[in-house]
Each structure stands twice: as structure tokens, then as C-alpha cells.
Amino acid sequence: MKKLGAFSFGDLGWAGLSLLAFVIALSFGATEDLSWEWVRELRLPRAVLAFSIGAALSVSGALLQAFFKNPLCEPYTLGVSSGATLGAVIGATLGWSASTFAGFAPGALFGALAFSAVLLLLSRARKVSQSTLLLCGVMLGFVGSSLVAVWMALADPAGIQSAIGWLLGDLSRAESANAYPALIGVAIAIGAIYFDHRSYDALLLGEEEASSLGVDVRRLRTRVILWSSLLVAFAVSVSGMIGFIGLVIPQLVRRTGSSLHRRVIPVGAIAGGAVLVLSDALARTLVAPHELPVGVVTSLAGAPLFIFLLVARTRVKKG
Amino acid sequence: MRFSRTRTRNRFAQAADVGILFALLSSVSAVAAPPKRVIPLMPSLAEIAVAILGDDAAIAGITEYTDFPASLAKKPSVGPYAKPNVETILALKPDLVLAGEDESPKDVLRRLRALGIRVVSVGTESLSKTRASFATIGRVLERPKEAAATLSKFDSAIAAVAERAASRRKANRRETRVLLQVGDDPLIVAGGTSFLHEGLEILGVKNVYGDVKSSFPRIAVEDALRRNPDAILLVALSDDLRTFERAQAKWNGYSSLRAVKEGKVKILRSDALVRPGPRFPEGLIALENALFPSTEKGTR
């Protein structure tokens, strides 16, 4: 494949996919009979929000996988998402619940930021190594999800239905007033992450090598935790837990071209966005007027596809 | 919340987009003619609307499980009551959406209003709120007289049940203690703030979970055994009878329970009972017949 710097022609495919995803998302829904006014009010913001969240999840996954040098890392590994969930359900019992404009968002954001702060404090400690930090994040996640289970056991069953729906991923609260600011916010965060792309490349060689190349690993660590937590906090608080994208899209992007982060970050953002826009369009239309949780769609459609790609690739190599 | 205000302003700008003529037409039609395309977002609200209107010609869409009167089931569905689909609602071009104050999702209602749809919310979680909802719905449908008639029919049916309860109390001084189960696994019962608790009060029986200040609490089986009710009634909704048969068998395994000894673990198939609408008294009579088979009345 002809190279365009770190980029390849294959990356145009991702860009094309995201365009196609937008066309599909705007054309299909629960009904064919919808005027452009309403498409603009309902479907467009939703597609934009889906794109922002897909991009946020994919980039934060890529970031964490590179930083911890662990391909199984994903945005939810560090427990920030459990913090968001916990915040959301506590918020719901305090009456900030789904009834308000922002739904579970304020509580979720608060919980995610609180957990992020704990992680950030841990990451500042001198003696905490990379792998210890990772484990601490995972433990934090367990604490969060156990506390959520406690709440689920005690709360009124009526509220649980909407909480469960939200946990599995729900973009139905998208509207112009939140989608466009979200897109801008995510773009800024991804831009800030992109700024460090050379450091991530260096990190893939190992921490010491990166240090010898002039990367201040401890400072980088703070930035990684900060940005990935912010992206996850945003994504979970707006739309609940949407699996698969943060784990698989970065790997898919790495497999389809150069692993330099100068490519992985922007292409990962576009690919993650495209896949979530497409998944959400499916979630809205497949069983209309019902809606499937979008997280279910991403995993159900995406996981087999990924396995297929892995196997197909291995075969080609052998042949 | 800040967003929401900005949004309202956006909506005004949008309304200008759509055209003043449209805005005028819709506001005029809302005042001048009774609603012709109504979407009730709960089965009970559909029942109330149809009871007041006399037929379902003006019902443009329904939520799932809206099956009374039976002809309503053929209307287009806008999804489950807990998550109706905004796009589907809009495509049905309603001039009135009836919603449950606590049941219908607030974000959907807020969005419908922002898109210029007339939405009226009524309370349903207590009998007094249900009674009030008759009048509200009658007013917005511009059929206040029919609404008053529906309400008085409702009230007299309830009064008849209460009268029989009073005569039972005279004959038998001991109060019957009842557990009203509405869900199994997890075990969910009617608590002290639900309208079903009020129903039990009208029947002159005691809800063993009346002290729990929640509408439908989840409870532990142990706690139910400790409270040892005289009767356990399982209110089965139309489609999950088997679940309740299993639950009934489970209760019957506790042979020392008073309700089991007296053969009073019963399944009650009554959609009317769980719908806070005009058929609630019917459901109440079904409950009465299950509790007191000897005093069975064919009253409707």
C-alpha cells in the first residue's frame, strides 16, 4: 500500500465510512415519514453526539493501551467508568435523576471526576509503578461497581429499569444543545492528546528508552490519566457504558496501517466515531419503535467482525 | 439546566423558521377544535380517554400493552410506555399527547413540547390523582360532561365495594391480612404508597406491607414469612402467568404459612386492577372475589 507519511490510502476508507455512517444515520430511523426540520432536530444531533463519543472512547483506549503497553486496556479499565456509574445512581436517588434535562450526566460526571482524582493522586505518588497504577485502577473499578450493586439492591425497582438501560449505552438524550458542545470539547481533548504523539511512540520502546529519548514519563503519566479520565467521564456520563469501541477500534486502526500515534490518534478518532454512528443507527432502527442499547449493538456486531478479521489476517500470513 | 433555557430560545428561532402561518394554525386549532389525534402514553390513559370520548376514533397511537378496549391494540404503537419513541410519535402528527406524571420519561416529554406538541401530564399513582386525571383529560378533550359521568360511575362502583367491606367488618371482627405480590424474582409487593394499597383499604383488609413507604418495594421472602399473611394474592399481568404459577408453588412449599394452610395463595388475573383507570373498580371486585369467595357478587 502506498504510504502518505504515516497515513495510508486505507485511512481514506475510514473517512469514507464515517461519511457513509452519517448518511445512514440521517436517512433511517423509527419512521420514514420525518421532515428535514425534525431530522435536523433529532437525528443530526444524535449522530454528532455518537461520533464525539465514539471518537472519545477510541482515542482514550488507544492512549491507555500505548501508555500501559497492554492491548487489553480500554477506557473502562481504570475504574473511572464505575465512578461515573456510581455517581449517576447516587445522583438518581438524590433526585437529580433521569427526569432532568441532562439525565444521569451531572452525577456521572461528578463520580467519574472523583475517581479520576483518586487515580491522579495515586499516579503522582513516586513509588507507584505503571503496573501498580493499572491494578489500582482495576480495584477502584471493583469498589465502584460493588457499590452500584448495593444501590441496585436497595433502590425502587421502577428506577432500576432506566438505570439499566442507561448502563448498556443510551444516546437518546442527544440534542443540539449538548451534541455540538460535546463535539467541540472532544476535539479539543483529542488535540491536546495529539500534542504528545511522539512520547507515546517512544513509550512503546519501553519506559527507560523513552526517558533516554527525553520523555518525562511521570509528567506524561499525569497527562494520560487526566485526559483519558476526562474523555471517559464525558462519554459515560452522556451515554452510559458503550463497550467494544475503546478496546477494539485502536487495535483495528493499528492493524490497518502504521502504529505511529501521529496516525493512530486521528484515524482512531474518525474510526471510533464512524463505528458508533453506524451502531446507533442500527440500534434505533432494527426493532423500532423500541431501541436497542447501543452498547449491545457495538459488541454484538463488532466482536464477531473483529474475530473474523483476526482469523482472515492469520490465514493470509500463513498463505 | 442552563442548556435547557438556551434550547427554548433555539426553539423560538425554529418556530419562526417553520413559518408564522403554521404556528397560527396550530394554536388556533388547539383552541377552536377538540383534539383529533391523541396519543396516550400509558394503557390506563388510553382507557380513560376512550371512556370519556365513547370511541377510539381520535386515538392516533398507543404504547405497548394498550389492549383495552381491544380495538386499541390495532392502533400504531409508539413503543413501551417507559421509553416511547419520539420519531414515531412525531410521524403520527398528534395534536395532543397524554402522559403520566411519574411514568412517562421527562426527557421525552420535554422534547415533544420543545418540538411544538401539546403534552398534558396527569398523576396516576394514587386513587385521588387518578380521579383528578378524569377531569383533566375531560377538559383537554373538551368533554367535561362525559368526564364527570365517567368519574361518578367510577365513584359509585368503588362505594359499592366499600359498602360490602363495611358489612363484612360487622360480621367478622378480625381483619384479613393480605400480601399483594406484583412481581417475582425479585419479589415485589404493593407497598404503602401505591394505589393498590388504597384498593386493599377500600376492601377493608390490611396490607401486610402497608408500613413500607414505597409504592412497589422489593422484599425478602424471610420477611414475608415473618409477617405471615392470611392471604397471598399474585397479580399476574397478561403474559407472564407461568412465572406466577411458579411463585405460587414456591409459597405453597412453606406449609406453616397461614395463607398456605387456608389455601389462600391465589393468582389473580386482572389487568384492570393494575391500571389506574375507569376499570379499576372491576379489578377491585376481582380482588374481592378472590379474597372472599363466599360473598361473591356479580356486580359490575
Image (cartoon, coloured by chain):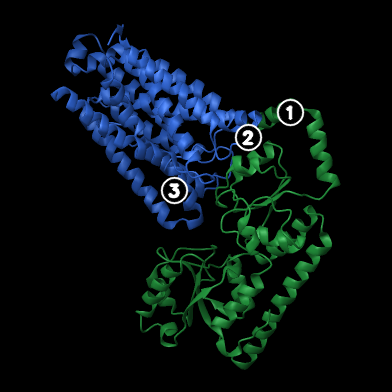
Q: Residue B122 location, x and y as percent?
A: 69, 55
Q: Is residue B39 above or below residue B294?
A: above
Q: Secondary structure at mark 3?
A: helix
Label 2 secondary element: loop
Which tint is chain A?
A: blue
Labels 1 and 3 in the same subunit: no
Q: Residue furthest front?
A: A319
- Residue at figure coordinates x 46%, y 43% from the top left: A292
Whether residue A300 is situated above or below residue B270 in the rendered picture? above
Q: Do marks 2 and 1 both belong to one polypeptide chain?
A: no
At 56% from the left edge and 59% from the top edge, which residue is drawn? B65
User: Dot 1 corresponds to which residue?
Assistant: B18
Q: Cα distance, mark 2 to mark 1?
A: 14 Å
Mark 1: give few (<14), some (14-19) or many (20+) Cα within 10 Å: few
Q: Amino acid at mark 3?
A: Ile
> Which residue corresponds to mark 2?
A34
Image colour assigned to chain B: green
Is there a contact, CB below 8 Å, between mark 2 and mark 1?
no
Q: Secondary structure at mark 1?
A: helix
Q: Looking at this rendering, what residue extends furthest in the top direction?
A: A5
Callout 2 amino acid: Leu
Residue at image coords 59%, 33%: A42
Q: Nearer the viewer, residue B1 or A61?
A: A61
Q: CA distance from mark 2 to mark 3?
A: 29 Å
Which mark is nearer the camera, 2 or 1? 2
